[in-house]
Image (cartoon, grey):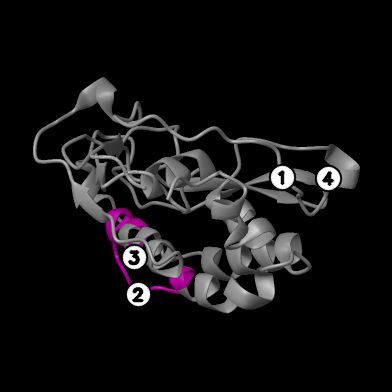
Amino acid sequence: MPTSSHLVTTTAYFPPLEWFVAALASNEWRWEAKENYQKGGWRNRCMILSANGPLRLSVPLLGGKHQQMPIQEVRIDRRTDWQRQHVQSIRSAYGRAPFFEHYGEEVLQLIDSDTDTLWELNCKIAEGLLRLFGASIELLPTEVFRGGAAGAGYSTPPPLTSYPQVFADRFGYVGGLSVLDGLFCLGPELAVLGLVQK
C-alpha cells in the first residue's frame, strides 16, 4: 500500500525503471520544473536492451539546449526521423518480450506525438505509462527549484531484483534500464515480484 511519500526527479524520456517503481510506490511524483536544461541524465534519453547490448535512445533537441534554457521551454528537433528510429529500435529489442504484444502498440503511440517541447512529450509518456498500470498517483511539476534534491527522491524505493530479460542468455541481468524493459518483460508481474509496493 502506498505510503504518504513523494518522489522528486528531473523530467525523463521513458524514465529509468527504478524511478518508475519508486513513483508507483509513492503518492505523488514531482518533476523539477524550475531548472534549466542540463546535458546528461535522462531528460531526453533512455536506455533499452537490444540484441547488441544496452542501447541509448535520444530525443534530438533544437538550439538552445546548451544555453541554460528553462526545461519547460526546450523544444524537440523535428528535422530528423527520430520517432521512427526509436519505434524500430524498441520493436527490435522487445518484439519477442512476453508483454510486448499486450502493451507495445499503446506505448509506441506515445512516441508518435505532436508535442513541441521535451517537457510535454515526457509528461505524455509518463502519464500514459501510469495509466497502463492503473496508478492513481499524481505527476506534478515542482513549484520551486529543488536543485540537487531532484532525482534523490523522498520515498524509499522498493528493492529492485533481477528479473528475466529478453537477452539474458547473452548479457546476463542488465540493470539501469528504462521502464520499457520492465514493462515488456514483466508486465503486471512487476507487482507480484515485489518490485512495486502496492
Residue type indicated by callout 1 = Tyr
Marked residue nearer the N-terminal end (2 or 1): 2
Q: Is residue 126 above or below residue 111?
A: above
Q: Which residues are magenta?
A: 110-122
- In the displayed structure, would residue 23 be above or below residue 183? above
Q: Nearer the viewer, mark 3 or mark 1?
A: 1
Find out whether the residues at labels 3 and 2 contact each other: C-beta distance under 8 Å: no
**Residue sitting at 39 percent across and 49 percent down?**
24
- State which tag comes first along the sequence, 4 or 3: 3
Label 4 to label 3, Cα distance in Å?
30 Å
The span from disc 1 to disc 4 (Cα, nearest Å) is 9 Å
Horizontal and vertical percent for residue 10? 32, 38
Pointer 2 local density, CA inside 10 Å: few below 14, some 14–19, many at least 20: few
- Kindly identify the amino acid type of the residue bearing the numbered disc 4: Ala
* Residue 47 on the magenta segment: no
Which percent across, then down, holds residue 9? 32, 37
Q: Secondary structure at mark 2?
A: loop
Residue under label 3? 124
Kindly identify which residue carries mark 4: 168
